[in-house]
Image (tube, rainbow, N blue to C red):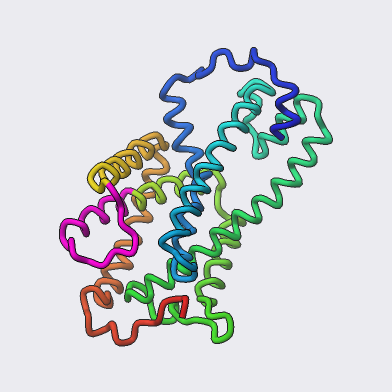
């Protein structure tokens, strides 16, 4: 896309450069934040990674850096290829090439999009079952969610449940609402993690830390503040849906997780399943 599109850029399409001002940039960042979701899924493979302290930061930060550069270049070419108003489509890159009269390149990009979407789904399907596994190991979900397949040693039950739920959701859910809910939920989770790391550093300074965050006050508070700021750019409908899902999660926690938490009930730790690398 970049090679073909760059040869047909019309610089007039860059004027005005930010037609909706900073507000448009803010809301746009909130809407497309889901493009950055998945890098955190690398951390869910920590128990299955060789030399995790070295390789996980390289994988996460390296992947973020490379993809950010690619995103900027692709966005620059796309908005120079055709006026930005014409990019409102489910397949904007293929659409931009089509409008520029590059039909063959458009077909190739569209075919590549099908493959890339499958790869993205695979990343999510890889990470979510392991999150459920970790929650069940901590007592926040029933024990069946922490069962491992005897041969592959992977959480096969949560993998099947996640796959069925995602398949049904793809049939029934509205795509725009799904993007917004994914964005606001992930940003909220990231902000909680930022504050949680700082809270643990204060409450349990001597805890064993295989991964240690430098400049904790700046990173923690700055990260949480940035997440909340981006969340503010999402529409009211996303906040309403987020409130309902948060309420549902709290109900599940207080009805089951609060009573069975290994952290609150150290005696329950005797039945804790092993890490995935075992």
Classify 241 as above or below 151.
above
Is there any visible trace of residue 191 in the rendered image? yes
Which residue: 48% across, 20% down?
20
Left or right: residue 191 versus residue 6 is left
Left or right: residue 151 versus residue 212 is right
Q: Position of residue 82 (x, y in %)?
A: 68, 22
Which residue: 62% across, 24% down?
79
Q: Residue 210: within the magenta?
A: yes
Is there any visible trace of residue 177 in the rendered image? no
Using the image as rendered, state which of residue 32 and residue 8 is in the foreground: 8
Q: Residue 134: within the magenta?
A: no
Q: Residue furthest right?
A: 104
Left or right: residue 222 versus residue 144 is left
Q: Position of residue 194 (x, y in %)?
A: 30, 50
Using the image as rendered, state which of residue 228 and residue 172 is in the foreground: 228
Left or right: residue 257 versus residue 130 is left
Classify 59 as above or below 184.
below
Which residue: 15% across, 60% down?
203
Quadrant of residue 206 within the rendered picture: bottom left
Q: Position of residue 238 (x, y in %)?
A: 42, 43
Residue interval drawn in magenta: 191-214
Q: Position of residue 121 (x, y in %)?
A: 60, 57
Using the image as rendered, state which of residue 240 and residue 113 is in the foreground: 113
Which residue: 72% across, 36% down?
94
């Amino acid at each position: 896309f970049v090679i073909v599109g760059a040869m047909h850029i019309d610089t007039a399409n860059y004027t005005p450069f930010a037609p909706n001002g900073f507000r448009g940039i803010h809301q746009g960042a909130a809407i497309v934040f889901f493009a950055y979701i998945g890098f955190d899924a690398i951390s869910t493979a920590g128990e299955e990674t060789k030399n995790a302290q070295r390789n996980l930061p390289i994988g996460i930060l390296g992947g973020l850096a490379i993809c950010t550069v690619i995103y900027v270049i692709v966005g620059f070419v796309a908005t120079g290829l055709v006026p930005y108003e014409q990019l409102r489509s489910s397949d904007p890159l293929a659409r931009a090439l089509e409008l520029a009269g590059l039909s063959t390149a458009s077909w190739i990009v569209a075919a590549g999009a099908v493959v890339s979407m499958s790869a993205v789904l695979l990343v999510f399907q890889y990470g979510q079952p392991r999150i459920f596994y970790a929650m069940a190991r901590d007592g926040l979900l029933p024990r069946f969610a922490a069962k491992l397949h005897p041969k592959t040693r992977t959480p096969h039950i949560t993998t099947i449940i996640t796959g069925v739920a995602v398949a049904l959701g793809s049939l029934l859910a509205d795509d725009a609402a799904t993007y917004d809910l994914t964005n606001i939920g992930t940003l909220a989770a990231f902000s909680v993690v930022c504050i949680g790391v700082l809270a643990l550093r204060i409450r349990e300074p001597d805890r064993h830390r295989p991964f240690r965050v430098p400049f904790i006050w700046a990173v923690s508070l700055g990260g949480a503040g940035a997440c909340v700021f981006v969340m503010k750019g999402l529409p009211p409908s996303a906040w309403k849906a987020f409130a309902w899902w948060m309420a549902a999660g709290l109900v599940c926690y207080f009805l089951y997780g609060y009573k069975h938490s290994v952290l609150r009930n150290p005696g329950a730790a005797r039945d804790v399943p092993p890490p995935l690398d075992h």
